[in-house]
Image (spheres, rainbow, N blue to C red):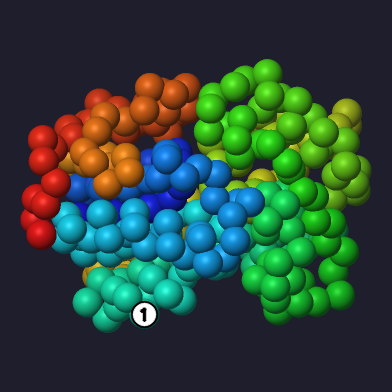
Amino acid sequence: MRIALVDAGIGLLAAAAALRRLRPDADLVLSSDPGGIPWGPRSPEDVMARALIVAEAAAAWAPDALVVACNTATVHALPGLRARFEPDLPVIGTVPAIKPAAAGGGPFAVWATPATIGSPCLRGLIETYAPGMAVTEVACPGLSDAVESADEAAVDLAISEAARRTPDDVRGVVLGCTHYELVAERVRAALRRPGRPPLALHGTAGAVAAQALRRVGRRPEPGAPADGTLTVLLDGRPAKLPARAGVYAEGRLLRPRDRAHPGAGHGA
């Protein structure tokens, strides 16, 4: 079984690590766009074009499913990617975890990039799953870029600013960007309040990984032999996992199996 994931940068590590935990025997293909990052400030048409390029590169390795491990790309490119690849290749998107956050009770906050905050997609999710509930949308400018570059000082500054603008009475926070899941514990620490239990953080990696396995008709097997390979594509070319990925637990989980293949087209 081979599953491909696409994103502008290392935000796809969270879903990739979740897949590795659920199916240690799965072969993973990580296709990203370091030459075009970030996607957030780009126009919807540009995001679609760039997402299609990295998806085509991943599809050349004949995966059984394609995960769009990026909220921005899901908002702007998912319909186009599904039109291009389905039904032959299932395409799984990533949307902010509004539904489980609402099920946990409000009020809650949504942390996301400025491109996602206020988008029709996010607004539709809130109206569908949290009607009448107090939901605070918190734009986090610079946080995904700081995570991408593994700039710890910038990460802490962006998290601190977002925490300052998050109401004290929220019961949970939706991490509305895949990059944010890589620094979830820092987010949790910044939101901790004296005398209150830790807030619930709602990410997407686990649910997306489980959905990908369902789409290919496989069940989680955490005890399977840990022999799955990892193929990394940067701007369409086989490469090593970027060194900055090792800053995060998810990257360290994947790195021991980093076996970038010597040439493109394997399995095409």
Question: Which part of the image, by quadrant, shows the N terminus?
Answer: bottom left
* Helix, strand or loop status at disc 1: helix
Horizontally, is 268 left or right of 127 in the view? Answer: left
Residue at position x 47%, y 65% in the image: 48
In terms of image quadrants, where is residue 156?
top right
Q: Is residue 24 visible?
A: no
Residue at position x 50%, y 54% in the image: 70
Q: In this view of the protein, which residue sits in the foreground, 74 or 40? A: 40
- Work out whether 45 lies above or below 244: below
Horizontally, is 36 left or right of 184 in the view? Answer: left
- Work out whether 115 lies above or below 260: below
**Disc 1 residue crowd, few under 14, some 14–19, many 20+, Cα 10 Å:** few
Q: In this view of the protein, which residue sits in the foreground, 53 or 79? A: 53
Residue 123 percent location from the top left of the image: 74, 71
Q: Is residue 158 visible?
A: yes
Q: Which residue is mark 1?
A: 83
Residue at position x 31%, y 31% in the image: 241
* Kind of residue sitting beneath label 1: Ala
Residue 12 percent location from the top left of the image: 43, 46
Q: Please, which residue is most extreme toward the top here?
A: 153
Question: Which part of the image, by quadrant, shows the C terminus?
Answer: bottom left
Residue 175 percent location from the top left of the image: 65, 49
- Work out whether 223 lies above or below 152: below
Residue 187 percent location from the top left of the image: 69, 34
In terms of image quadrants, where is residue 157?
top right
Horizontally, is 109 left or right of 4 in the view? Answer: right
- Work out whether 206 lies above or below 258: below
Residue at position x 68%, y 18% in the image: 153
